[in-house]
Image: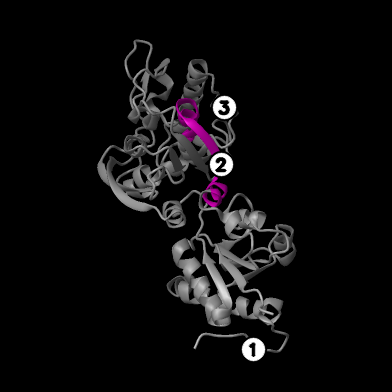
Amino acid sequence: MEQKRLTVVTAPDSFKGSCSASEAAAAMADGVRDALGPAVTVIECPLADGGEGTLDALAAGLNADIREVDTVDAIGRPRRARVAVSADGTTGVIEAAEANGLPHVSDVDLQPMRADSYGVGILARHLMDEGVTDILLCIGGSASNDGGMGFASALGVKFLDESGVEVASGAQGLGEIRSVDMTGRHPRAADVHFRVALDVDNPLLGSRGAASVFGPQKGATPEQVQVIDAGLANLAAVLADSTGVDARELSGAGAAGGMPACLSAVLTTEFLPGSELVMGAVGFRELCAQADLVLTGEGSFDSQSLNGKVVAGVAGAVPSGCPVVVVAGRVMLDPKEARDAGITAAVSIASGPSTLVEMTDEAIDLIRSSASHIAAMYGTFSPSLGHSAGSTPAADC
């Protein structure tokens, strides 16, 4: 009787500073094949949590075409940014940081009151003009604090002061808003469905809000934090009066300088944890339906991994009874903490005492080696492969 082939899914996040999610997934797959040879089916599914690398992970999972678009950075300087479009032209992908990310304005002093999200809106407008019906928008890593006002402005929405004049762009204009004019809004704004990836659950306002928590990272002084928080409160109040949508009640509205405030009021939006959005878009649950083993991973497996990150998402999506093993640069959780989170085991890629630089330089080889050890161990006891303890798993020649 022919035995069932072993199916292994490799579904890591990127190893920050070392390799992309796609590179890590391929390295894990190579390691599995090294150990088990032709007796295994390996499915590579690179993932991300809505931050850096999400565009690449989604493009790979959707087999989408990546292209460059003219836009501007957070302080209005011209730049080229990548977007992706699915083969059938219906789904677009935007990683907001491609336009208004902090690294693109690192050559000058940070300008927390001026920086805006206009460049991200340009990318959305481009995709809407192309006719996409579904946009996956990943908003982490921004340099702006404007509540998404710049984004909405790029789609034709006007934010007016008490004299009916458009307010200044960026956080500096938030407190002056008295009305919102949506008569010039993009004609497809209500028809395109935006799925927005959130990498935090912070509210828009207050001690855990956009200004207080993330403003200082973007250069805001304590005094500016107070001004920005008050400005975001004003923006939210005006939008609530104008549209009936109150971002002050939206979990995660503090992400990306409060960008969800305008997104929720101006567009047809669905907000999701980043890892959940990515897994849904690439059909991760379906890929894992028949899996015998799932390998995931990231640079550091720690308490943050269990809070909306890829590893936690994978553990929650894999069918009951299928082992989930984490491969990581460092493992900071004890076995019980891992098991309580649905993780079968966690393995560090360190082969001995190593510096961070050494592990970074050799990450792909170390990930491959670790995956090979895990697969060999699993294969030894797998009924699917007909192995028993002490036998030697198949290997590539």
Give the residue at x 33% y 19%: 166
According to the image, label 2 marks what residue? Answer: 272
According to the image, label 1 marks what residue? Answer: 392
Q: In the image, which disc is placed on residue 63? A: none
166 relative to 207 in the view: left or right: left
Q: First in sequence: mark 1 or mark 2?
A: 2
Three-letter amino acid code at the position of disc 1 = Thr
Q: Main secondary structure of the magenta part?
A: helix
Label 1 vs label 2: CA separation? 44 Å
Q: Secondary structure at mark 2?
A: strand
- Is residue 71 shown to the viewer in this render? yes
Give 101 or 112, whichever is nearer the viewer: 101
Give the residue at x 41% y 41%: 219
According to the image, label 3 marks what residue? Answer: 248
Q: First in sequence: mark 2 or mark 3?
A: 3
Give the residue at x 64% y 63%: 290
355 part of magenta stretch: no
Three-letter amino acid code at the position of disc 3 = Arg
Q: Magenta region: which residues?
A: 258-280
From the viewer's perspective, is residue 69 above or below residue 241? below
